[in-house]
Amino acid sequence: MKKIFLAFLVCILLAGCGGDSQKIIEQEPLTDLYDAAYEEFEDKDYEDAAEKFLSVETQYPASEWAADALVMAAYSQYLDDDFPTAILTIDRFMRFHPGHRDVPYMLYLRGMCYYRQVSDVRREPGMSVYALNQFQQLVGRFPNSPYAKNAKNKINILKNYIAGKIMYSARVDMKKENWASAITKLQSVITDAPETVMPAEAMYRLTQAYTAIGLPEQADGYAEMLKLNFPDSDWAKKLGKK
């Protein structure tokens, strides 16, 4: 009885393997698929272009066009302001093509995806820190790439932005008379962001903070530091008017 049942089961399974399951799904030719994606890109239909470029990469992952398709997909998503998805596509590119000639560009593009999401100085820096890390990585690894000069400019902008965020927070602390927190933040601007435009104001604010808590020697020390390092700044002039 068991042999008869097993034979019957095998017949059912073999029957299930026939019909539609034996149809061969034909892939669209690589050149046609890539051309269609590029046509969408040229028409500025970036969402559809990205989908088609990704299809090139998924259907033909071993082709020499796969990496280029990921680059174009990420760029299309960036132009479509779909930054989170573009970052995921760039991550995929970095994972499968770490030695590709377009790695510097993809680092730059990932930095730009974060950079474009930077909000105003009163909010958490978040994206600015991520963008700064990407641009610093690009300059560090590929200092002679065509994107390094622009990345350096973005680094300066981002450092000033982040220092400005800290300064804004310190001013809020001072208004609330939260002196310890304000002093810590102001000192961090001087030590961590000396190349930005913020240290002169930080020194001026430190003279105010230390004066407020009754430590005139520390206040005088920062006043002298301000006069020595930024003698022509508005903050030094403002200090002289006191």
Image: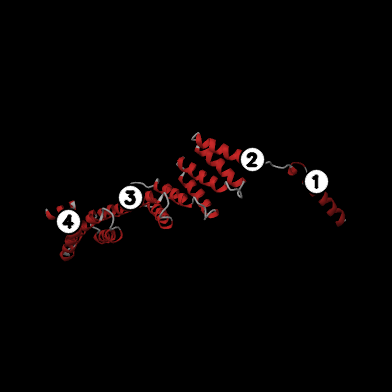
First in sequence, mark 1 or 2: give its number: 1
**Location of the C terminus (image quadrant):** bottom left
Q: Which residue is mark 2?
A: 29
First in sequence, mark 4 or 2: give its number: 2
Answer above or below: position of 68 versus 42.
below
Q: Which residue is mark 3?
A: 157
169 left or right of 82 in image: left
Q: Position of residue 87 (x, y in %)?
A: 48, 49
Q: Amino acid at mark 2?
A: Pro
Density class for disc 4 (Cα within 10 Å; few <14, some 14-19, many ≥20) is some
Q: Is residue 163 visible?
A: yes
Q: Check residue 15 in the rendering and tell me which mark sits there, or answer none.
A: 1
Asked if the residue under mark 4 is in contact with the one under mark 1, i.e. CB atoms within 8 Å, the reply is no
Asked if the residue under mark 4 is in contact with the one under mark 3, i.e. CB atoms within 8 Å, the reply is no
Q: Amino acid at mark 1?
A: Ala
Q: Which residue is mark 4?
A: 231
Q: Position of residue 20 (x, y in %)?
A: 74, 41
First in sequence, mark 1 or 3: give its number: 1
* Near-viewer residue (50 or 186): 50
